[in-house]
Amino acid sequence: MASKQGALACLAAATMLAVTGCPHASSGVSRPGTTTQQTSSPDPTPIAPPATPPLLPSAANGATMQITVTDASGAVPGAQVAAFGPTLAQALTDANGQVVLGSLPIGSYTVRVDAAGHQGCTRAFSVSAARQALTLSVPVVAVSQPLTGTVEDASGNPLAGARLALGDAWTMSGADGTYQLAAASPGAVTVKKTGYAVATTTGGVVQLTAQQPKVAFEDSPFAGDEGATAAIFGSLESALAAAGFVVENQDDPTADVRVWAAPSDLGSVSPTDVASYVQAGGKIVVMGDWGGATNYRPDLADDLLLPLGVGLENDLVRVDTGNLGRPEWFSPIVGAGPASNGVHSIAVYGAASVQSATPMQVVAGIPSGGYRVQDVDANAVGIARQVGTGLVVALGDTDAWTNDASDDVAQDDNLTFAKNLIAW
């Protein structure tokens, strides 16, 4: 692995706030790096998302934002408030419906507010100067009767992990296909799931029609040439093809899933393009690595992820095995959800940590004994975050899902886990 890249630049200058409105607001085991024989292990364990994820690098003299969340009855305590842009910051509102987010570097941000019994609300703002106390009031709308129903396939089987959205109201179907969407006003809810045609619903049962999905591996892993992509991800690509995917090794903005593994050059792809793609219902999977593998650029990974509320650190997560002089294989805790279907255990090698704003799901968490080099806190090495009907997946390791001399995807249930994430 290459030496760690520098932290995100800390910027300081003069501050200005520009706000846009909310829709509807007016109404643990060390493993060798060789192929292993799978043994029995516990079923996947649900992982509670961290209430306050650790901050990405931020400006010590950055702006401070005081946010007040209210509804028609007054203050809304216990609301999740997240700001994401050049960094991530997140906290719960107090009894007065207030929260203060600090050390915000200059740049464009999104604030997302989620409160039980209320429709989610998203606002945009920008910081253009340092050390100024800013304020923002966010009204949210209480929802007494959420939209409910079930997502099924054409044969009536429940579909888990389907993404439903109506404006800023977002949710996913559960393991039994049921959903509950806190929408403040009636309308056609868009329903999206990889491998199925987009549908709409106004509640009740919605059936999705299967269609052949397409996945594009869009970069050159580890700064290799494009022709190497298929070889590096051969086992994973073969598994996806066997599952009915069309697999490409090229940039394709029309693909259902777009994968960037240890990105070192995004070519003509811009973060704005990717954000628009996800907000329109697309799915991206970004794989990182600790400190950067060969010419891997952690800053480029975050250029894609941070505007969507996810951060991929360039730190190193280890497990305290008594052998701390090098990274080692360890088994994260697999979170319950579509990615864990048929998975008992996965193994990663020297992963970076990932963080996310809500709503999100931890798909791979730090095990007992795990810790984060350069920090005392660690939560996850794999996160999935819904954005409208789109999905963002960030994994803190690339090596574990590729083919090398030790065939990393043969480690425990790695191949199944990676295939599940892409097929979600």
Image (cartoon, rainbow, N blue to C red):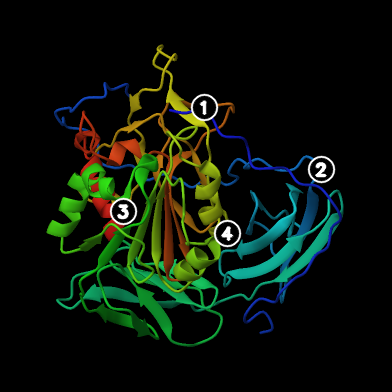
Marks 1 & 3, CB-CB < 8 Å contact: no
The amino acid beneath tag 2 is Asn
Mark 2 → mark 4, Cα distance in angstroms: 21 Å
Mark 1 → mark 2, Cα distance in angstroms: 27 Å
The amino acid beneath tag 1 is Ser
29 relative to 301, above or below: above
Q: Residue 132: where, in percent of width, then height?
A: 87, 53
Q: Residues within 10 Å of mark 4 (few under 14, many from 20)?
A: many
Q: Residues within 10 Å of mark 3 (few under 14, many from 20)?
A: some
- At 22% from the left and 40% from the top, the residue drawn is 413
> Earlier along the polypeptide chain: callout 2 or callout 4?
2
- Mark number for residue 103? none
- At 54% from the left and 30% from the top, the residue drawn is 4
- Mark number for residue 3? 1
Residue for badge 2: 61
Residue for badge 3: 421
Point out the image quarter for the C terminus. Answer: bottom left
Point out the image quarter for the N terminus. Answer: top left
Residue 383 seen in the figure: yes
Kindly indicate the quadrant of the structure image that contains residue 197: bottom left
For marks 1 and 3, give the one nearer the viewer. 1
Judging depth in this view, the residue of 65 and 219 nearest the camera is 219
Judged from the image, the secondary structure of the residue bearing numbered disc 2 is: loop
> Earlier along the polypeptide chain: callout 1 or callout 4?
1
The amino acid beneath tag 4 is Pro
Q: Residue 43: where, in percent of width, then height?
A: 25, 41
Q: How many marks?
A: 4
For marks 4 and 3, give the one nearer the viewer. 4
Residue for badge 4: 307
Q: Residue 369: where, in percent of width, then height?
A: 44, 23
Judging depth in this view, the residue of 372 and 298 nearest the camera is 298
Judged from the image, the secondary structure of the residue bearing numbered disc 3 is: helix
